[in-house]
Image (spheres, rainbow, N blue to C red):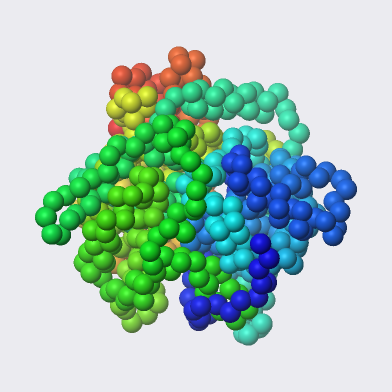
Amino acid sequence: MKRSLKKKPSNRINKAQFTDWLNTAIPFSVWRWSNKKHVIEARDYIFKEIGEEYRYSRAKAKDMDMLLVFLVNLWVGFCVGCPIQISLNKNKYSKNDVFGKVFFTYDRTIRILNQLERRGYLQLSIGYFTTEDKKETRIWGTEKLIRLFVEDYHFQPVGDVFTREPENLVQLREEKTRKILNKKTGKTRTVKYSIPVEYEDTDAILMMKERLTKYNTLANEHCVTVKLQEQDLVSPNILIDNILRGLVSGSIQVVKSELQFKDPTENKLYTEKPYNSSISDSVRTPGLSVFSDIPGLQITSIGYKHNIYPTLQDKDDTVELYDIDSLLPSITHTLYSQQWRTYQPETALFLYLFYMKKLFNLLKFQGRTKDIRDMKRKKLFKATRPLADFGIRHLEFEIKKKSLHRVFNRGSLDFDKGGRGYGGFYQGIPDSVRKRILINGHETVEYDYSGLHIRMLYHQLGLEFTGDPYLVGDNSLRDEYKKVALISINAKRKGAHVAVRDALKDEGFAIADDLGAVQGLMKDFQVRHVPIKEFLFSGVGIDLQNKDSKIMDAILTELHERGITGLPIHDSVIVEKEHADLLEKLMIEKYREHMRGFDPVVK
């Protein structure tokens, strides 16, 4: 198993390409885990190698558990083609933060990282700050580590990792600012970042945790699936980010998948047989990793200076694509090969989505400036097309990650800032896909509060408002004004116009190119809502979130008492269709109780 620590990369890239790759990082998760025998054996081998010299004498079991978490995170990162983003801020490891709630300590983290790096199993890029976002340290497994996983221990991309239940059900965070010096220009800029705040459990917090525990228990007793057919609209982001990542990390599990296999000589269409995951898992026999058995696919390395990371490469990696029309045939053409029919459906789906992601990453975007190219990229990745356009006839998967935790902000020990529930995989998919959610095999319905925060501002002043809050002028720019409304609730006045412009740019709105026009939208929106003008662009959103989180908590508690699972998405809830009338009634009742008797608009 001895391998060289240094190996020249097969391909060299430039700084911009390496930075782009770093920016695709996915968060490190302390809840990723594996109980597979071959994964445990790989962990034991590596622990023996990095531990013998230093002879860990204390908390050996916790060191080994932590090493396992690191290894499965690095494996997930390789399988989705991304580095892992991890914080090395000592404050992150306090007892109330996600790391401190389990066996992670700062000293243990640094020790494991150092030993993995020293033995050539891991590389890292130390975190840095930008004006847009806090960039934490990136880590990735080296080719030496990945080959050990694949060739010696036969890791599988699907089924080896799962997501455990979180323990820190109530989190409290505080926003900080920091001055960063640009050595080239000599100028400083202020960046924001969040740190955990320690707190003592009160009776109210303990009751909140108890309600969350009951909710999570009930949610995990029910089967939540997503069933997509060939005519359903999906975006590339959904396929190559949400579904691919969820598949590898164990957040979702394939129930059935059908790819479009076409035989060019017979002009016939073939599909995979339905896949029953429970049967397949029970009869699967150990064997080589799928990466070892695919013609033309090989583990290789890419490098920028001393940074070298492994990836999967095949003959199509050199293809240059310039538009979606040339990309889709390149993706689906691969399905003509007979080899696809030899894989387990969940394996075939993984390989196909991985291949799709690689081709999307190769897609070139025309434009005079980087901003224009980035806008085109974001717009394309969010644009929806029928599932069949991507070569998939049917896709059904079960959501395994359903548990919620609540996050409070601004370090307020009164827990009166924020407080919304996060954690469910379903929260990260668009409403077009959420419409295909089934609970216990039954169709569902989603009710949401229309224009929730704008109405709440009116209602807390004792004023009625029943119209469309986003209707300004002739309604031709309703979607743009909806973005303005979102920023007006959450951003403070200083720099708000930049935040609005960036939000519009992310959605591909052409008006984002004209900052003056953006400011005009903001002024018109304030004129439309003169009675609540003082609250717009004041940062009041964090207080409104606290109120809507209490309303949502009351709704979910009532549903739980009736044995009904509700899936919350901040201002909306999904239930089985048979409970639709009850849900609508509860949403109106609980809103009235918290908002001075005023009625919401529920759709």
Q: Position of residue 213 (x, y in %)?
A: 59, 26
Q: Residue 438 sits in which quadrant?
A: top left
Q: Is residue 216 left or right of residue 30?
A: left
Q: Residue 458 sits in which quadrant?
A: top left
Which residue does the image show at 42% across and 27% down from the upper left? 223
Q: Position of residue 445 (x, y in %)?
A: 31, 29
- Point out the image quarter for the N terminus: bottom right
Which residue does the image show at 34% across and 34% down from the upper left? 437
Q: Position of residue 163 (x, y in %)?
A: 55, 40
Q: Nearer the viewer, residue 528 or 178?
A: 178
Using the image, determine if residue 319 lies above or below residue 341: below
Which residue does the image show at 72% across and 27% down from the upper left? 202
Which residue does the image show at 58% across and 73% down from the upper left? 308
Q: Position of residue 74 (x, y in %)?
A: 59, 56
| Any part of residue 473 in sight | no
Using the image, determine if residue 96 lies above or below residue 143: above
Q: Is residue 135 left or right of residue 93?
A: left
| Any part of residue 302 in sight | yes
Using the image, determine if residue 105 lies above or below residue 49: above
